[in-house]
Amino acid sequence: MGFLKKLFPYILLLFFIGGCSSSLIKLDIEPGYTGLEMFGQKSERSFYYDIQKIDTLKLKWSSSTKGSFTNNTVVTAEKFVFINDLAGRITVFDIETGKRKGMLNYKGSVYTTPVINKYTTYFAVAELNNPSSLLVGYDIFNGVELFKVEIEGKIVNELLFLDDGIIAITGNGDVFKYGFKGEKIFQIRLRKGINSHPTLYKEQVVFGTKEGEILILDKNNGQVKRKVKISDQSLNNGSIKNNIFYIGSDDGNLYSYNFETGKEKILFKTGSKIIAAPSFDDENIYFGSMAGWFYSFSLKKEKMNWSINLNGLINASAMVTKDEVVIPDLNKNIYIVNKRTGGINSVYKYEGRVKLTPVVKDNLLFIGYDNGVLECYEIQ
């Protein structure tokens, strides 16, 4: 009994260590990897994938991060898939098996999709019990933190990758640009609420404000090049197609702004909030509203192709393929819709609210829903 008493503290220590989650991502990525992955695939934000018709989805694996998701996406790098969560984690899974290959754990919430450039991932942590965020650069090959800088304000909008740095925008309107070594390049205080993911058009950073303005900033120095007032209510998330910026608003309107002509207009009035960034193919724009309606609108004819009432809540962008639109619905459904007719081809039901915009990698489809469940499907 005396021996066991002496041994007990060591047993307790081993139990504690074994029960703690390690914070490490160290991956066997191939030498020379040059991938660039981010929310919406590129800085203009695109949710189009060049794949054929989805006949069925066969579940390959299901894993969990134990933390809930926001309305963003996974990103992939070679044989790995990355996801952030609101419990302050970046988790990496094996793309074939769903086994966890690494995790970074911070005190706070990671609202935005990590950016991966070659062997480095960049992400932001909104700190717990602190009105600030951490911008982190992490070497996923060697498993080391390259830099960690504290930023005043909560970063809840997606990061924007540039050829010479990262743009981060806080909810209270501070715009930061940092270099790839964590050096601050500029900080601009706009004093405007921002609930809009930044996009890039040539040398200009573009996003909306809660005051209903489109702001266009010089990507090199942060100088405001133009303000375009188009609504009396908040502008939400936008995307760019063929020199035109498209963005939805709390007033229920879908707006467009032409960079070449400098003209803006209302494309369509839905009557309900449009939160998610629109999606495109070469001919049409696809978008949904918080009233559960989903729309296909012709860019050339500037008229509605079709609309469908899904009786849910659409606040994540749809994925578009050659033949279909894959629509995540907060009302625990994924709809696969014929993009030419608006007819529903199939419906997949889930136990939690579907949060993530679907992503395709090597004929595998990734879907995420509450509470932190990530599933991988084979497309058949």
Image: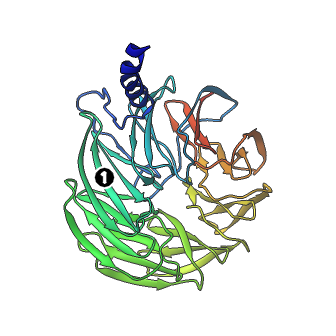
Please state which amino acid type lies under the numbered disc 1.
Answer: Val
* In this view, 374 is above or below 60: below
Residue 276 visible: yes
Disc 1 element: strand
Observer-nearest of 190 and 301: 190
Observer-nearest of 258 and 47: 47
Q: Which residue is mark 1?
A: 136
Residue 380 visible: no
Taking the view exactly as shown, the residue that stands out farthest to the front is 2
* In this view, 99 is above or below 228: above
Q: Position of residue 257 (x, y in %)?
A: 50, 75
Q: How many marks?
A: 1
Q: Quadrant of residue 279?
A: bottom right
Is 148 situated left or right of 64 in this image?
A: left
Q: Position of residue 15 (x, y in %)?
A: 43, 26
Observer-nearest of 201 and 3: 3
Q: Quadrant of residue 116?
A: top left
Is 118 situated left or right of 303 in this image?
A: left
Q: Residues within 10 Å of mark 1 (few under 14, many from 20)?
A: many
Q: Position of residue 125 (x, y in %)?
A: 40, 56
Residue at x 65% of width, y 42% of height:
323
Residue at x 75% of width, y 50% of height:
341
Quadrant of image for the N terminus: top left
Residue at x 66% of width, y 44% of height:
324
Is 102 situated left or right of 69 in this image?
A: left
Q: Position of residue 346 (x, y in %)?
A: 76, 39
Observer-nearest of 39 and 337: 39
Quadrant of image for the C terminus: top right
